[in-house]
Image: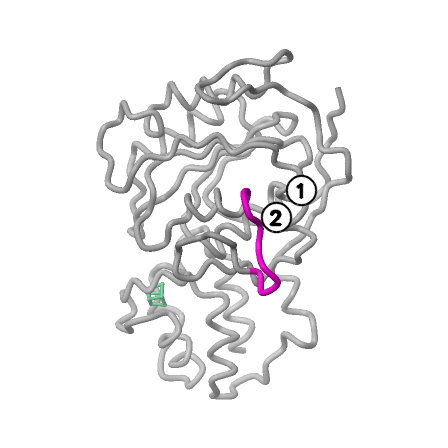
Amino acid sequence: MLKVKPPHGYPPEEGRYVRGNDYSPVAVCVILDTFDFAIPPELNELVMSGIDSGAALSGMLQTENTGMERMICNIVANPNIRYIVLCGRESTGHLPGQSLLALKQNGVDEGKQIVGSKAPTPYLYNVPMELIDRFNQQIVSIINLLCKPGEKDTKAPGLDPKVIEEAVRSCYQETPAVFRDYTLYDMGAYPEPAICHKIVSKLTQPEQTIEPGKASIGMGLALHKFLPKTDCKKCGKRTCLAFAIDLAKGKSRLENCPILEQPEFAGDRRALAKLLE
Ligand code: SF4
């Protein structure tokens, strides 16, 4: 069975995930349905159960755009990963779980909008189309255990660590194993080389460069690309776009967005700081 050593630099994107067995055929994606700093302990437990049971990567997905872009980059950098176990409970408003399923089912249109996503901003602007296509080809199945928004019952399949462990183990069986509605086995690595792509590298491209200090809508739009796009209002503005335009005009500072302090957004924060230099 084909297995490959992931390239130097894998996984290319930072985030709230743990790296496990590089040769495992499965990653675990736990939807993070809060924008507070404290991660609910039951979701942390799901991430750890994914790693303990043998996943290659196990982590949180918070947003339907930048979070999904990072996940795509990390998965196509390891061709051994052929399955995603989707669990946790759906996040209302941003619908990252529904968006991930829609991406796998329908792909994106020419504007990189996820076809069929019901999320407000399901755009994958910062990853090349090649990566999106590769992701959809490399991942053969998303094992959907996602719970409804607000689910509290930790015995519900998508919140039960034992069910997550069973799903992960089913993915690396040598012969087909039935897990709920899925027949799973380790089919080996995707037969094309890994693609190790870092999103912030696009900042070096001339067409992405915005004149420093220029207070304009254009600058605001460029900054907006790297904001969390949660519209959570914690910065005092009604939307991330309004905050971006204030940033462009020098009326606000990055420190006013507490969401950017979260580890998942470390790369975006650096990109924003570079644009604002
Ligand atoms: S910019 Fe404002 S609205 Fe957007 S994530 Fe940060 S705090 Fe929330």
Local secondary structure at mark 1 = loop
Tell me what residue is drawn at x 69 percent, y 71 percent. 205
Q: Amino acid at mark 1?
A: Ala
**Residue 166 place in picture, x, y as percent:** 45, 17
Q: Which residue is mark 2?
A: 73
Q: What is the magenta range?
A: 104-112
Residue 53, position as x, y percentages in the image: 49, 20
Relative to 225, is 263 above or below?
above
Task: Report the label total.
Answer: 2
With respect to residue 54, does 214 lie above or below?
below
Task: From the image, tell me which residue sits under label 1.
Answer: 77
Which label belongs to residue 211?
A: none
Q: Quadrant of residue 5?
A: top right
Where 18 sits versus 62, above or below? above
Nearer-the-camera pick, 248 or 158: 158
Could you tell me if the residues under marks 1 and 2 are in contact, i.e. CB atoms within 8 Å?
yes
Magenta stretch encompasses residue 263: no
Q: Quadrant of ligand 1?
A: bottom left
The residue depicted at 52 percent of the width and 83 percent of the height is 218
In the depicted view, which residue is nearer to us: 135 or 255?
Answer: 135
